[in-house]
Amino acid sequence: MSDDGVLHFNPWMDFNDGPPSENPFGCDPDPEQIAVFLDTVFSWCEGLIPLRGFVDKGQGRDGKPHNIWIPADDTAPEKLATFAGWANREGAAVYVIPGTVEEQGQARAADVLQMQAIVVDLDAGDIPAKLDHVTRHLGTPTLIIESGGRTPEGAAKLHVWWKLTEPAEGDDLATLCRLRGEIAVKVGGDTHFRSAHQPIRVPGTVYHKHGHQRLVQIREHRSVEVDLADFAEKVAEMPPLPGVGFASDVAAPTAKPGIDAVLTTPVREGAVDDWSRFQGASAAIGHYVRLVHEGRLDPFAGWEAICGYNAAMLRPSWPLDRLMAESERLWELHVKRNGPPLLRAAHAGAPASPLPTFSLGALLDDTSPMPEDIIGPRVLTPGGLLVLGGAPKVGKSDFLISWLVHMAAGVPFLGFTPPRPLRVFYLQAEIQYHYLRERMQQIALPAAVIVAARNTFVATPKLKLLLDAEGVARVAEAIRAAFSDAPPDIIVIDPIRNLFDGGPEGGGENDNTAMMFFLKDRVELLREAVNPDTGVILAHHTRKASKHQVKDDPFLALSGASALRGFYTSGLLMHRPDEDSSVRRLEIELRNGPALPGKLIDKVKGEWVELNPLNERLVRKEVGAKLDAERLRKHDVILGMLLDEAASERLYTAMQFAETFENRGGLGSKHTIRERLSVLATKGFVKFLRDPSGFGFPVTRSRFGYLCVEGMQFGAPADHVDPATGEVTTTARPVLPSHFKCPQSGLCLQVENPAVWVYPEGLEDDLTHMSEA
């Protein structure tokens, strides 16, 4: 400061020539907080930022205010930090007008062109109560700043900021200033902020009033952005703080225009229409940015549409460099909020390719080898879509997991053959992690298959995810991370229902329009983002349908059937022909190859197997099933009777048993009983004792002898007391066979070891039935 009391100031030389020294009071500007503040208040704005340096009161020194203007660009944080350093050495506070102007020297309210943040200054009264009120009604703020001052009660004075999603100018700027004043009125804040040119302290600089040095500091910072119109509605609905604020008579702002109106309504400069040129351009650009990001519009076509809107609807049009800058800004913001785009890099800067066409001659002359099937024969082809349908709990997921693991190992499964070990990404939304690993461990898989598929089969746990534009981007990133060296051969979505996005109309999977949107704008988009030749498998539920409908055309049972059948290249449908049987039938429909017959499949000892269709009845299936059940019932009744009679100390030859129990227990005539005994003897359930003299029965002239079944005991178990020790033991008298009927010749042959009951080979089904009974 010179003798005449004037501080002569060269904006940058004086700042940079100041000696770098630590403040003896330990309070220096914080460049990081300055940078955060500038990002919140000026990151969207263009033009110059007006700054002011005032010598704070109560220091015993005077000085003129010093104004500088710095560009609202990447250099602003460094320049403002330099200015703050100079101000700190001079005992000056740093203020900013939170908006941009066009030229140096401008600082009036009318000169402010853009603002992008709303602030309320809480400088008196019960500040914590006021902060709680605005936060509760207006939402979490972006910044809460302690300005350095204190109330008489000792509370820190606060500046509360909300960052907008886009800069306000024209009428929106007037709305912003009105909202600042209205908030202040309702909570007892500083109403001077009705004016656009009201300055405010910059966080990261130093407060010097009355000799108290404090850092103007950020108490809280959150990545929060608000829409101006939405925020205005909240301000209008916020009640005054009781005992402090006053109601506002300002009417709520009108709603934002719809995109259809924006795209078809010309807008003139000077804010003379319902919305400004900036509002219209931002809305139109944002609309096309979303379409490009979701892959619904090629980026080249998106830029053409933006340029077309600029030329047709903005009067006068924006310069192309400004249009490009605003487009890039909104693009970067959209990507930051919604994740990486799907197709921008693949098609950016190039027009859509022409539709391919081929003449008859070209098709006939092309004898090049056919593409290799992903799953043969023609079940899943490159770029193909396979739908696996079935009712809930029919076993789709279990079957699908077994199938996929075999494909990942390069091992055939039920006649479906992979050319090599395939890379499989299984996106499932039904089974949580722990139950998924339990199911994987329970599925019976050959050891060689497990070893081969350990790293080529990748599954997700149950996801709380909607396969919308953001979901597609997240899944694509997960697939790239899982298979970083090469894209997957198969992407599986199980089930469609839990991930379904029906588009703007919000239809369900039974809505054909919604299903077509999901297939074209979600599934195909995901495939294109990963690898256009990847095969896709969708697991889908079926509607309730009668057996007759399923028999006539099983694929009509698929939810959204007409859309699916017009889109997929292969269809598999799993159903139970007989609800009382575990056997499933797998119907197969192919578009890219010859028809394949359906398969009968079942899960035996934990493994899926294909059954011989020749063993299936073709006519009178229900009658045959009833007869089978009756034969099995007689089987059980006869064996049970023989056990009970032996326990009652009665043994029988075949003829005597048939005559004794004719028409008892629903066994029918003696001839029927003799036939069933003969069958049971052939199958090894009944054997024979030729010499029962040990049980008090005479030797018979019968061809085979007395009937004997496994586990047979003669009489009730007897208790014996040891005279020496007094120990009581229970003994039983087993009836062991001496002969059996040969299942091949029907001859009576001697048993090798009576203590070991041996069944002929091939009777697993009968033994299983007995164990279940």
Image (spheres, rainbow, N blue to C red):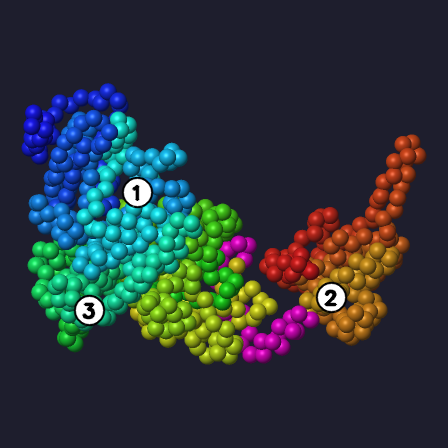
| Residue 338 at x, y percent in the picture | 29, 53
Is residue 32 in view? no
| Residue 196 at x, y percent in the picture | 20, 50
The residue lying at 8 percent from left, 58 percent from top is 320
Q: Amino acid at mark 1?
A: His
Left or right, 582 with respect to 109, comes to: right
Q: Amino acid at mark 3?
A: Leu
Q: CA distance from mark 2 to mark 1?
A: 97 Å
What span is in magenta?
604-630
Dot 3: what SS?
helix
Is tag 2's residue or tag 1's residue first in the polypeptide sequence?
Answer: 1
Reading the image, the residue beneath label 1 is 159
Asked if labels 1 and 2 touch by Cβ distance under 8 angstroms, the answer is no
Q: Residues within 10 Å of mark 3 (few under 14, many from 20)?
A: some
Left or right, 189 with respect to 19, comes to: right
Q: Which mark is residue 677?
A: 2
Q: Nearer the viewer, residue 118 or 392?
A: 118
Q: Nearer the viewer, mark 3 or mark 1?
A: 1
| Residue 51 at x, y percent in the picture | 15, 40
Q: Which mark is residue 263?
A: 3
The residue lying at 49 percent from left, 67 percent from top is 391
Q: CA distance from mark 3 to mark 1?
A: 38 Å
Asked if labels 1 and 3 touch by Cβ distance under 8 angstroms, the answer is no
Residue 91 lies within the magenta run? no
Q: Nearer the viewer, residue 517 or 670?
A: 517
Query: Up-down: is 46 above or below 152?
Result: below
Left or right, 740 with respect to 144, comes to: right
